[in-house]
Image (spheres, rainbow, N blue to C red):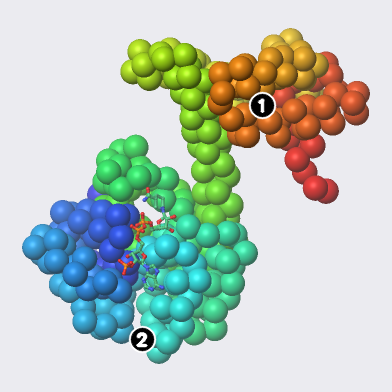
Amino acid sequence: MPTTSATAPVSVLGLGLMGSALAAALLKAGHPTTVWNRTASKTGPLAAQGATPADTVGDAIGAAPLVIVCLTTNDDVRALLAPEAGALAGRTVVNLTNGTPEQARELARWAAEQGVSYIDGGIMAVPQMIATPAAYILCSGTDEKAYETHRPTLAALAGTKWVGDDPGAAALYDLSLLTGMYGMVMGVVQAYALVGSAGVPAREFAPLLKGWVGAMTEGLVPGMAEALDSGQHLTDVSSLAVNQAALPNFLAAYEEAGVSGELLRPLQGLLDRAVEAGHGADGLSRLVTFLEKG
Ligand code: FVH
């Protein structure tokens, strides 16, 4: 993990599961850390670790040149920061709240109007991963210099990846990565439901499922990228036609087992459309082009 300048003060607004983990990591790295949360009692455990609880948002903002925000939604962020424009002027906000690219751009426009440096971030970690080598934070915005200035402080939380000067870029990458995660998680949920319907203990099935999902992801992710970038979707792995023919078996098996097929059923329509359009010999990468609205 990159080194961090432990003397740089920082303020954290929002002490939910993630905000608390971020503040704790900053404290552990030696940063003087001021914390604020709407429900003030959540500052207690961090104060015990050395944080300074602020009575008001304005006090927290005034305590550091770098203000990290991690709330539930960007509407919450906007509502919290809008009355604090004066206090924020000249400081840098790193917003690690989940949101859309357009929300990030809007916040960046608002911040620029107030003389605030705005960096949008996407945390690729759960709270328990903060300050471990597996965690990283995607960052983007129009002020790369501010990012470079505060990068050593952010390094106390996770590695950082700058993904460009479009403030929406971090959210785009974040949501795309989380999309991949949700697809995988939903597949795992469906698999446990099906196998569990026959009384197979989840713990017994877990090693098989883990190995299979891992092996599939290993080849599929780079293979699909190759097909998409080259436009060569013909496959010798597994054609859309053969997947189209097999999918009804999955849906029928769920029915037989008394398990809902709602997670996978939409795939049938997508496969049908692609095969009917003459792409039966192509691989699954072709489906990406059928999701594009154009
Ligand atoms: N937890 C995770 O694994 C993921 C990892 C990736 C990033 N996400 C995003 O991080 C944001 C916060 O998530 P969280 O897990 O910390 O969420 P909570 O524990 O529910 O805490 C929410 C905090 O937001 C405060 N809050 C909500 N609305 C307002 C508001 N209108 N004004 C001020 N603060 C607000 C809330 O305050 P309180 O309820 O304690 O008073 C919490 O501090 C989120 O975008 C994830 O998608 C986490």
Taking the view exactly as shown, the residue that stands out farthest to the top is 236
Q: Secondary structure at mark 2?
A: helix
* Residue in view at x 82 percent, y 27 percent: 272
Amino acid type shown at disc 2: Ala
* Residue in view at x 70 percent, y 19 percent: 247
Quadrant of picture, ligand 1: bottom left
Q: Is residue 286 left or right of residue 184?
A: right
Residue at which label 2 appears:
87
Amino acid type shown at disc 1: Met
Residue 129: numbered disc:
none
Residue 224: numbered disc:
1
Q: Secondary structure at mark 1?
A: helix
Task: Tell me if I can see residue 7 in this picture.
Answer: no
C-alpha span from label 1 to label 2: 48 Å
Instruction: State which quadrant residue 224 falls in.
Output: top right
What is the x, y in percent for residue 72? 42, 62
Q: Nearer the viewer, residue 210 or 134?
A: 210
- Is the CB of mark 1 within 8 Å of ligand 1? no
Name which of mark 1 and mark 2 comes first in the sequence: 2
